């Protein structure tokens, strides 16, 4: 390589491209990469000891499901185990701990920042115990196990992925090992590779798989350990007494921080050009944990939390039904229309103080919590299935267009009204359904998958909600309710510059005209130039044959809001982000934890860290019995044993703080907005955001009684 030493001497493009300087500035190895690769996450004290043992604690209890007891007999008696240091074990224990092992590891499901550090932590711990230990990484997720497709993970492989995001080292996939034939294939691979242990890094379904594999491979002596991964943050474990044992899965913090940083950038943007509402859909298949964390990190003007909407009770409907001597079973859970009204209310209030812009956060899984959507899906599933069962042709061929399908539904609703007979589809269903935008109606009426299930992931949740918002805002604008507030100063300046007396026109133009009001709102009855003139004439500030004075028209035009939106989706970007300090450290310790569990013979356990909600010095590595965390859930139409997923607890301190502060964060008052700058992701050194805010608040408020307003 040549060096272009003298900038004064010209050279050919070919020579220029061959210089060291060009090579260096365009190299794949950025300074950020070098820094990340060399970062050493701190280890929990216990992992500084050369050996570890597992202490069974009788401290934590679970309600074990009888089905789990029946299907997982060899691992169901597992308990919570603490990893304890053991400086000087007996010789046999030492030999057992350090014996040569073959370990397999697989990533399962969507990527989550920190996965590579699980591998790094496991690798470092196993090499410390015995340099001959071997680690095999199954490629492309569980398919790698089924097809015996793997790489051997070496020191060089590990060193080139330390502290990096993604699952690039061995990739991932969503295949489930959920049938006897797949179980058999998995077993064959484990035995062929002479694995002592298999590590499954995944979400609720993958950890469920880990438990069943642990049972399957028990007699063969292959241990199976799970690791809690998912950006959705819905792997959270508490015992029956509410003790938190795993506050969050890894990857959540990074994804939330990445989303928060980007959402905050939009807060800066919208409060600068003051013309857009930025609509931010954030990932999270069902639970709204990510949306809540983004809300707490950034204070966007409006953040929706699905779990809260499902919990809503419409008192008005209940009272009305009571008066009529009936019960309204549909008064529980918010409807889409109510959600859109809620958003509109915020938009209108902000516009009134001159803020016709803002940021709205909508969780990806929102529709799961909207009662009527669930009801529609169930009803339409039934209607389509019934039609197909009783006719020679199928529903979609018979009614190919949306209009055909709607007409069929209308007929059903008419039948229920005219004949006063019970049909699955009644007039109220039809009314509610017709409020939905076409594309959403079409989505709900599309063909079901092979199991007859509706695919939520195909819905554009944000556009569904905002479509209704736009319609309603238009209505509010037509009614004169949605208006831009005008500052008193700008009103007076415009009028005086035009040679008009502001105090003469003020009472005719504005509701509650007071010169010392911060913002003035044009009267509701003024919704057009025509109605403006009518008002001015009525208030006798101009004659009927006089034109509207230019400054007055200018003020009116300024009061008419334009609702302009920009849509953003935050999901894959945050999921692929390099991990935060929290996730780097959490996962590196999880990897170490996995080795301690394996070296002590554990199987059917999930590696976890207790006290994640506290400072790092309090973190406590533990093993959790996966079998005890299972319950029955409907999957593909049948009840199945799965690890329980945690939704946002609307009684939790974190949610309560959010709920108490959100009106302030809407900032529908004159003056500055309340946006918070979380800053970009950090990984070196502790900082104020060393943990998710949700965790910090839940810890701070752990002694506060729910509903205690004092
Ligand atoms: P995991 O639960 O497998 O970690 O994945 C979660 C997730 O990132 C969700 O937030 C999102 O809805 C989904 O994956 C997207 O899945 P896909 O990668 O198949 O598009």
Image: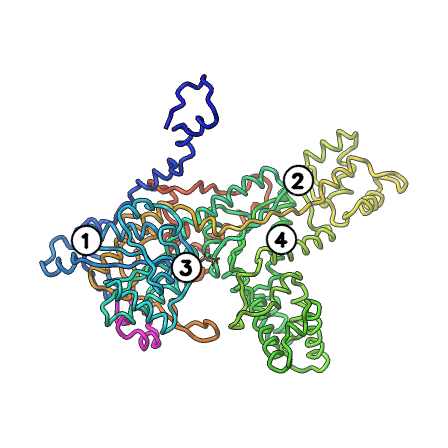
CB under 8 Å between discs 4 and 1 = no
- Mark 1 surroundings: few (<14), some (14-19) or many (≥20) residues within 10 A: some
Q: Quick one: label 3 or label 1, which is nearer the N terminus?
A: 1
Could you give the CA–CA distance between mark 4 and mark 1, rounded to whole angstroms? 65 Å
Give yes or no for contact between labels 2 and 3 (Cβ–Cβ under 8 Å).
Answer: no
Residue 703 appears in view: no
Residue 621 lies in what quarter of the image?
A: bottom left
Residue 430 or 351: which is nearer the viewer? 430
Dot 3: element: loop
Q: Mark 4 points at which residue?
A: 345
Question: In the image, residue 449 lies at what x, y percent?
Answer: 54, 69
Q: Does the residue labelled 1 lie within 8 Å of ligand 1?
A: no
Classify 10 Å Cα crowding around label 2: few (below 14), some (14-19), many (20 and above): few
Q: Distance between the residues labelled 3 and 1?
A: 29 Å
Alpha carbon distance from label 4 to label 3: 43 Å
- Residue drawn where x is 71% and y is 67% of the image: 403
Q: Mark 1 = which residue?
A: 132
Q: Residue at x 76, y 37 (%)?
A: 554
Disc 4 versus disc 1: nearer the observer? 1
Residues shaded magenta: 60-78
The reply to whether the magenta stretch includes residue 417 is no
The residue identified by callout 2 is: 517
Residue on which disc 3 sits: 173
x, y percentage for residue 18? 41, 29
């Amino acid at each position: 390589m040549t060096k272009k030493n003298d900038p004064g001497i010209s050279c050919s493009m070919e020579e220029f491209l061959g210089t060291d300087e060009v090579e260096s500035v365009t190299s794949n190895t950025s300074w950020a990469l070098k820094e990340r690769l060399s970062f050493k996450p701190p280890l929990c004290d216990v992992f500084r000891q050369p050996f570890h043992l597992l202490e069974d604690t009788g401290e934590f209890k679970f309600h074990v499901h009888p089905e789990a007891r029946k299907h997982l007999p060899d691992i169901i008696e597992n308990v919570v185990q603490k990893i304890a240091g053991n400086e000087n074990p007996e010789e046999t224990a030492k030999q057992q701990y350090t014996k040569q092992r073959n370990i397999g590891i697989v990533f399962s499901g969507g990527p989550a920042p920190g996965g590579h550090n699980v591998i790094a932590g496991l690798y470092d711990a196993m090499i410390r115990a015995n340099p001959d230990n071997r680690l095999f990484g199954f490629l492309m997720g569980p398919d790698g196990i089924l097809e015996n497709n793997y790489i051997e993970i070496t020191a060089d492989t590990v060193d080139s992925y330390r502290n990096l995001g993604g699952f690039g080292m061995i990739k991932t996939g969503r295949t489930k090992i959920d049938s006897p034939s797949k179980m058999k294939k998995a077993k064959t691979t484990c035995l062929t590779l002479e694995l002592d242990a298999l590590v499954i890094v995944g979400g609720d379904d993958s950890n469920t798989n880990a438990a069943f594999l642990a049972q399957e491979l028990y007699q063969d002596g292959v241990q199976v350990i799970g690791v809690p991964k998912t950006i959705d943050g819905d792997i959270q474990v508490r015992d029956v007494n509410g003790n938190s044992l795993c506050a969050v899965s890894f990857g959540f913090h990074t994804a939330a921080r990445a989303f928060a940083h980007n959402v905050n950038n939009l807060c800066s943007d919208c409060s600068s050009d003051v013309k857009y509402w930025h609509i931010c859909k954030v990932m999270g298949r069902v639970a709204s944990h990510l949306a809540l964390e983004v809300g707490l990190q950034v204070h966007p003007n409006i953040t929706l939390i699905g779990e809260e909407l499902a919990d809503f009770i419409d008192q008005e409907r209940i009272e009305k039904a009571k008066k009529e001597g009936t019960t309204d079973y549909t008064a529980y859970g918010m409807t889409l229309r109510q959600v859109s009204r809620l958003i509109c209310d915020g938009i209108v209030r902000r516009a009134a103080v001159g803020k016709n812009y803002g940021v709205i956060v909508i969780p990806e899984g929102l529709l799961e919590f909207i009662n009527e959507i669930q009801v529609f899906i169930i009803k339409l599933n039934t209607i389509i299935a019934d039609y197909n069962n009783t006719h020679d042709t199928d529903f979609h061929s018979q009614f190919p267009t949306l209009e055909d399908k709607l007409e069929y539904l209308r007929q059903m609703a008419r039948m229920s009204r005219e004949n006063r007979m019970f049909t699955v589809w009644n007039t109220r269903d039809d009314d509610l359904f017709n409020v939905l935008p076409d594309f959403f109606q079409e989505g709900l009426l599309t063909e079901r998958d092979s199991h007859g299930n509706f695919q939520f992931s195909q819905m554009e949740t944000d556009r569904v909600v905002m479509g209704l918002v736009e319609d309603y805002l238009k209505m509010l604008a037509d009614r004169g309710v949605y208006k831009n507030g005008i500052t008193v100063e700008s009103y007076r300046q415009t009028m005086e510059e035009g040679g008009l007396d502001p105090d003469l026109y003020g009472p005719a133009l504005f509701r509650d005209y007071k010169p010392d009001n911060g913002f003035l709102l044009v009267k509701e009855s003024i919704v057009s130039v025509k109605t403006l003139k009518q008002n001015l004439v009525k208030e006798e500030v101009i004659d009927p044959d006089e034109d509207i004075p230019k400054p007055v028209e200018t003020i009116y035009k300024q009061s008419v809001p334009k609702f302009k939106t920009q849509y953003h989706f935050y999901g894959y970007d945050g999921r692929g982000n390099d991990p935060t300090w929290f996730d780097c450290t959490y996962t590196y310790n999880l990897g170490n934890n996995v080795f301690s569990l394996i070296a002590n013979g554990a199987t059917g356990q999930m590696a976890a860290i207790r006290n994640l909600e506290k400072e790092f010095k309090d973190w406590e590595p533990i093993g959790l019995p996966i079998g005890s965390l299972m319950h029955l859930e409907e999957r593909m139409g049948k009840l199945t044993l799965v690890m329980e997923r945690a939704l946002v607890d609307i009684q939790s301190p974190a949610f309560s703080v959010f709920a108490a502060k959100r009106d302030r964060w809407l900032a529908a008052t004159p003056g500055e907005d309340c946006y918070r700058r979380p800053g970009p992701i950090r990984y070196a050194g502790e900082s104020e955001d060393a943990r998710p805010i949700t965790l910090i608040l839940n810890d701070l408020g752990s002694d506060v009684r729910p509903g205690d307003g004092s």
